[in-house]
C-alpha cells in the first residue's frame, strides 16, 4: 500500500507571527496524525523558523515553496538548499505552476533544482499539470510526459523514494474548479506509466502522486478514493485549521 501525503502550500500568506500562531493551532489539531498519512506545511521562507519551532514536537513536516538552483554565492535574493536544511526544512516544492508561469521556470531549470535538492538531502514535491488551453488542444499527455521526464531527468530509482509528484491542473488551482475524480485518476495513472517507462514498475507503483487544485473538505474523500491518488497539495484550504484538519483526517 502506498503512503499518503497531505501538504499545505501557504503561498505568499502568513507573516512570521501569523504563521507561528497558526502552526501552534495546527500542531494541536493534526500534529498527532501517524500511520500511513504524512502532513506537510509549506510556509513562505521568512515564516519557516517560527513554524519549525511550533511543530517540532509533532508529526508535521515543514517544506519550502522553492529554492535556488545554486549552492551558494552571489545570487541576491535566493535561498539555498543548505539554508533550508539548517532551518529545519525537510522537503521542497519545485515546479509549481505559479513559478512556471509567473517566473518563467522551465523544465531544465526545475530539473537542476530537483537534482540539487535530492543531493543535499531534501525530499522533493515536483508539481506538474496542464493549462486549460493545453487540455482543450489535446496536449494533456504530451505536457505531463514532458514535465515528468524532463523534471525528473537523471533522478536515480533509489532517490525516487524521496520524490512526490503533484498533479495540479493549472485551471483547477485557486479557481474553485476541481478535476473530477476520474479525470484526475486517469492523469495520475498516465504519470505513473511515464515513471514506469523512465525507471521501472516498482518505482512507478510506489511513487506518491498527490492531486492539487481546489481540494477542500467536501471533495477530498471522493478524490482520495481513487486508485492512483495518494494525497493532496492544498492551497487556499490549507490557510485555515477548520478546512485543513478535515482534509488531513479525510479517512476518519
Ligand atoms: C496550489 O497552489 O498548489 C493549489 C492547489 O491551490 P488551491 O488548492 O487553492 O487550488
Image (cartoon, grey):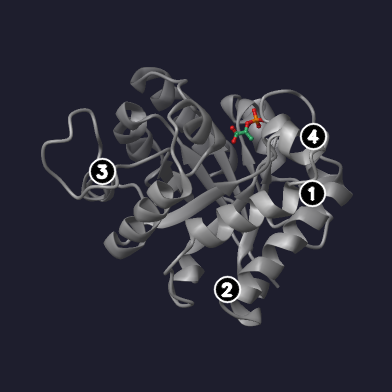
Q: Looking at this rendering, what residue extends furthest in the left direction?
A: 73
What x and y, as percent, mark residue 12? 45, 22
Q: Residues within 10 Å of mark 2 (few under 14, many from 20)?
A: some
Q: Is mark 3 within 8 Å of ligand 1?
A: no
Q: Residue at label 2?
A: 198
Look at the image and tell me whether residue 216 can be seen.
no
Apparent side of residue 77 relative to residue 18 in the rendered image (left or right):
left
Gap in angstroms between the C-alphas marked 1 and 4? 9 Å
Which numbered disc, 3 or 1, marks the residue closer to the eye? 1
Mark before the other along the chain sequence, 2 or 3: 3
Apparent side of residue 187 relative to residue 11 in the rendered image (left or right):
right
Residue contact at pointers 2 and 1, CB within 8 angstroms: no
Q: Residue at label 3?
A: 87
Residue depicted at 61% across the width and 24% down the height? 240
Report the front residue among 139 and 37: 139
Instruction: Provide the secondary structure element on which disc 4 rests.
Output: loop
Q: Residue at label 4?
A: 178
Instruction: Provide the secondary structure element on which disc 1 rests.
Output: helix
Q: Residue at label 1?
A: 184
Gap in angstroms between the C-alphas marked 4 and 2? 29 Å
Which numbered disc, 2 or 1, marks the residue closer to the eye? 2
Residue depicted at 66% across the width and 42% down the height? 168
Amino acid at each position: 500500500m502506498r503512503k499518503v501525503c497531505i501538504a499545505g502550500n501557504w503561498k505568499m500568506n502568513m507573516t512570521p507571527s501569523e504563521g507561528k500562531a497558526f502552526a501552534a493551532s495546527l500542531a494541536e489539531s493534526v500534529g498527532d496524525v501517524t500511520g500511513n498519512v504524512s502532513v506537510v506545511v509549506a510556509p513562505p521562507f521568512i515564516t519557516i523558523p517560527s513554524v519549525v519551532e511550533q511543530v517540532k514536537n509533532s508529526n508535521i513536516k515543514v517544506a519550502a515553496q522553492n529554492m535556488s538552483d545554486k549552492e551558494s554565492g552571489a545570487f541576491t535574493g535566493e535561498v539555498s538548499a543548505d539554508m533550508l536544511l539548517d532551518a529545519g526544512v525537510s522537503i521542497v516544492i519545485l515546479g509549481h505552476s505559479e513559478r512556471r508561469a509567473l517566473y518563467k521556470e522551465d523544465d531544465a531549470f526545475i530539473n537542476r533544482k530537483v537534482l540539487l535538492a535530492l543531493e543535499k538531502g531534501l525530499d522533493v514535491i515536483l508539481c506538474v499539470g496542464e493549462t486549460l488551453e493545453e487540455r482543450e488542444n489535446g496536449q494533456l499527455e504530451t505536457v505531463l510526459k514532458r514535465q515528468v521526464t524532463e523534471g525528473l531527468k537523471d533522478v536515480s530509482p533509489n532517490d525516487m523514494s524521496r520524490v512526490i509528484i503533484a498533479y495540479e491542473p493549472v485551471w483547477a488551482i485557486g479557481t474553485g474548479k476541481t478535476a473530477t475524480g476520474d479525470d484526475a485518476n486517469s492523469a495520475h495513472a498516465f504519470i505513473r506509466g511515464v515513471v514506469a517507462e523512465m525507471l521501472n514498475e516498482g518505482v512507478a507503483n510506489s511513487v506518491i502522486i498527490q492531486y492539487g487544485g481546489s481540494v477542500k473538505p467536501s471533495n477530498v474523500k471522493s478524490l482520495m478514493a481513487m486508485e492512483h491518488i495518494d494525497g493532496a497539495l492544498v492551497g487556499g484550504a490549507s490557510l485555515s485549521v477548520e478546512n485543513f484538519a478535515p482534509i488531513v483526517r479525510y479517512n476518519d
